Amino acid sequence: MNPELGEMAQESSRRGFEVIIETNGTFDRIEPLLGVEGCHLWVAVDGLNQSSYEVYRQGGNLENVWTTLRSLAEGKRAHDTPWPRVRLQFIVMRHNEHELVSLPERAAELGVDELALKHVQIGDYHDRPREELGSKLWPRDPRFVLDALPGAGKPMLCPQGLAATVLSNGDLVMCCIDYDGEYLLGNLFQGSSLLDLWRSPRGRRLRREALLRRTELCEKCDFTHVHPLVFRRRSKGPAFEGVT
Ligand code: SF4
């Protein structure tokens, strides 16, 4: 995690941007994020106990994530601010779908603002075939199996072709799946502006290929435009109604 994350969020907010931070929730410097207007923190928690959590989040410590969420709730109360808005994100899989029943209560107890239930995405770039991994990870509940959704299959155009992804080393890359910067538009720490790289001939070509899913990486990728099911916290009645 970039140690200046909070300051980056503050600056972006000051310039009028909405900020979404996706994290596994294992960072402890939350103070700079408190009160940052327009800042949303999405914390991935894919299990309610250590054994179900670490099936997917290997090597992770769930207790650290609970500590972060509790500190955020306490910090917001102390500063009397609704920001950052905290979302607990839960990828529904075979080994954790039984936990959906107790998830709303747990989320309310941790003081999060939103609960998001996501389907698992399995590309073909793992050392095991997609079907084999899927048979282990896809839940029984068809609402959370991508292949079972109406209109299943990849959308023709990839929305990532319209998004800018910058890695922590300043590389502007084709999309958020290009972790290794294989499809590089250029580097923002070496004098070029994002707009220059975005509009360069290489930038235009890569964005077009991304949009049309034409690269080798795209062939193996399961990225979809299907959104998670999101539940907002209510002020009265059950905290997150309709989850199960
Ligand atoms: S389909 Fe291609 S451009 Fe879209 S997210 Fe996957 S790898 Fe990236």
Image (cartoon, grey):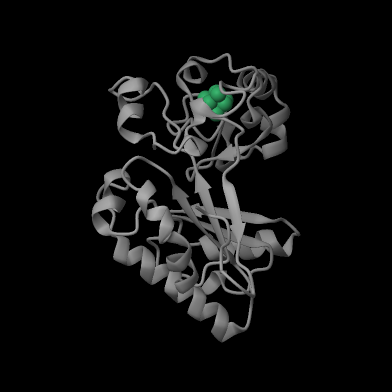
As drawn, the residue found furthest toward the bottom would be 78
Is there any visible trace of residue 184 in the rendered image?
no
Q: Is residue 187 left or right of residue 37?
A: left
In this rendering, the answer to whether 48 lies above or below 83 is above
Residue 200 screen position, x and y as percent: 70, 24
Image-based side of 223 in relation to 35, left or right: left
Mark yes or no: residue 32 visible.
yes
Residue 158 rendering spot, x and y as whole percentages: 63, 25
Point 48% across, 46% down: residue:
168
> Could you tell me which residue is drawn at 40 percent across and 61 percent down?
102
Q: Nearer the viewer, residue 3 or 144?
A: 144
Figure disc tally: 0
Among all residues in the image, which is located at the extreme right? 16
> Residue 139 location, x and y as percent?
39, 37
Ligand 1 positioned in quadrant: top right
Please name whichever residue, 175 or 109, is drawn nearer the observer in this view of the structure. 109
Residue 76 in picture, x, y percent from top left:
56, 78
Q: Quadrant of residue 225?
A: top right
User: Which residue: 35% across, 21% down?
Assistant: 131
Position of the N terminus, as image quadrant, is bottom left
